[in-house]
Image: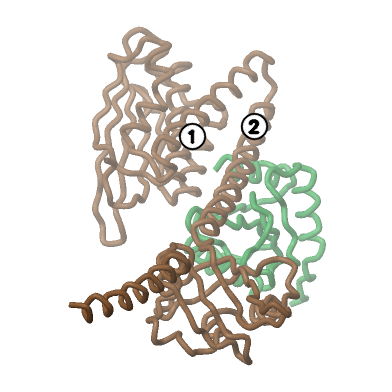
Amino acid sequence: MADVTAKSDVQKEGEARVDAFRQDLGPFVVAAEKTRMPMVFADEEPGHPIIFANDAFLALTGYEREEVLAKSFQSLLAEGVDAETMPIVDAAFRGECENDPEVHYKRKDGSEFWAKMFVSPVCEEDGTVVQQFVSFVDQTKHQQDNAQCKMLIDELNHRVKNTLATVQSIVTQALRHPAEPAAIRQAIESRLMALSQSHDLLTSGNWEGAGLHDLVDTALHPFKVVAGHAERFTIVGDNVHLSPRTTLSLAIAFHELATNAVKYGAFSNDAGTIRIDWTVVEEESGNRVLIHWLERDGPKVTQPKGKGFGSWVLERGIAHELGGKVTLEYLTDGVACTIDIPISAKLAE
Amino acid sequence: MLVLMNVEMVLEDLGCTAISAAGSVAEGLSLLAQQSFDAAILDVNLGEQKSYPVADKLTERGIRFVFSTGNGNHGDRSDLDDRPMLKKPYLTEDLITVFEQLIADMPMPTAA
């Protein structure tokens, strides 16, 4: 019994020392192992052999622990970074780097990440550097957000400039022929409104395009509601998906057709009607949509004297911008317009 | 589309005849194959496409051209940076000046 008690004292003492050690260092070791911040320790020897790498570092770089332990930190890094990065990293190890280096690194599997690298020397009491402690902050998401942001700003700038050029054209064309200031203002404003509405339509679809039915509804909305013509429009066709470019061009085309109908055509009296329908034509060279605009029961149609903005948009604009074919006929019974343009296949949701 | 309209009208006012327009690289190349041109204005961005193949064909054919863009740079085609560039929106006067220069720089037709 005595022996057992004596042995137990020794054991107790030993266990207490281990406990003390654990209490002193244990949580830190566990923390270093388990923290989500990637960390390595490297010896202060040529090449800086790695003596410790935590789980987060292995997860970040895609290496196994045995692949990195005892391996030179510099050569491990050099496998995945650009040549110009290495001198900066070397300078950081010498404590000569003013800003913490940001490395763009290719993992073992070729995927890439961005990380900010913090190098901190571990010194003895006399100041001799014995190890380097290196930690990382993954900047990949930050870099992706920045790149996305820059792309959006560039794209926005591009659209703004194009839109301004379009506005310039609308104003210039409206001033091309002598007219009353009020008529010029009205022509400019209604086209700007049409442009604005087609932008709204595209924005609601994340600028990936719009459905043809939605586009026709949007383009004709001012004419339907303001003039109370809703029952005199017949619109028949699927919500065929159109690219942003097609959407913008067709919106102007429908606006011009409707404006003409209100001024001179089927909507300039109390009885006229307009039927708009379309079908998708599948061809080997790609799908097309064939749109018919047909006015009936309006005043007797006479051939217009000159070619204005609207007929340019329809007869030349659509053809050039969209590679389409347009026929615009001033038939005695009513204006008839056929628009035949290429489209991508998918239907709008 | 309406920007093109403006360009066409300005060129017509300048006395240009036979103005053709293309909305895609394929159409542009096809036009170049069919007709001869004195000068061209080339939008950098044609929807999803860039117009560089047309620029290269114009260069090959010795046809002078000016770029027009809402962006202001050529990205990966910096070899084209020395070409004249109209940044949208641009003044009608600038369009006229550029075209007058393009036409003035044209090589004289060789006597038959």
Q: Chain of mark 2?
A: A
Find disc 2 in the rendering and name its residue: A173
When asked about the image quadrant of residue A72, the answer is bottom right
Looking at the image, which residue sits at the far left?
A1
Q: Position of residue A154 (x, y in %)?
A: 60, 50
- Where residue A257 is drawn, which disc sits there? none
Image coloring type: by chain
When asked about the image quadrant of residue A132, the answer is bottom right
Q: Position of residue A177 (x, y in %)?
A: 67, 26
SS class, disc 2: helix
When asked about the image quadrant of residue A4, the answer is bottom left
Q: Residue at x 36, y 51 (%)?
A: A342
Residues A348 and A135: in front is A135
Same subunit, tags 1 and 2:
yes
Tell me the brown chain. A
> In the image, is residue A291 above or below residue A2?
above
Tally of numbered tags: 2
Q: Residue at x 68, y 75 (%)?
A: A92
SS class, disc 1: helix
| Kind of residue indicated by mark 1 | His
- Where residue A199 is drawn, which disc sits there? 1
> In the image, is residue A158 above or below residue B48?
above
Q: Residue at x 49, y 57 (%)?
A: A141
Q: Position of residue B105 (x, y in %)?
A: 81, 65
Q: Chain of mark 1?
A: A
Q: Is residue A299 visible?
A: no
Tell me the green chain. B
Q: Quadrant of the N terminus of chain A?
A: bottom left
Disc on the earlier residue, 1 or 2: 2
| Kind of residue indicated by mark 2 | Gln
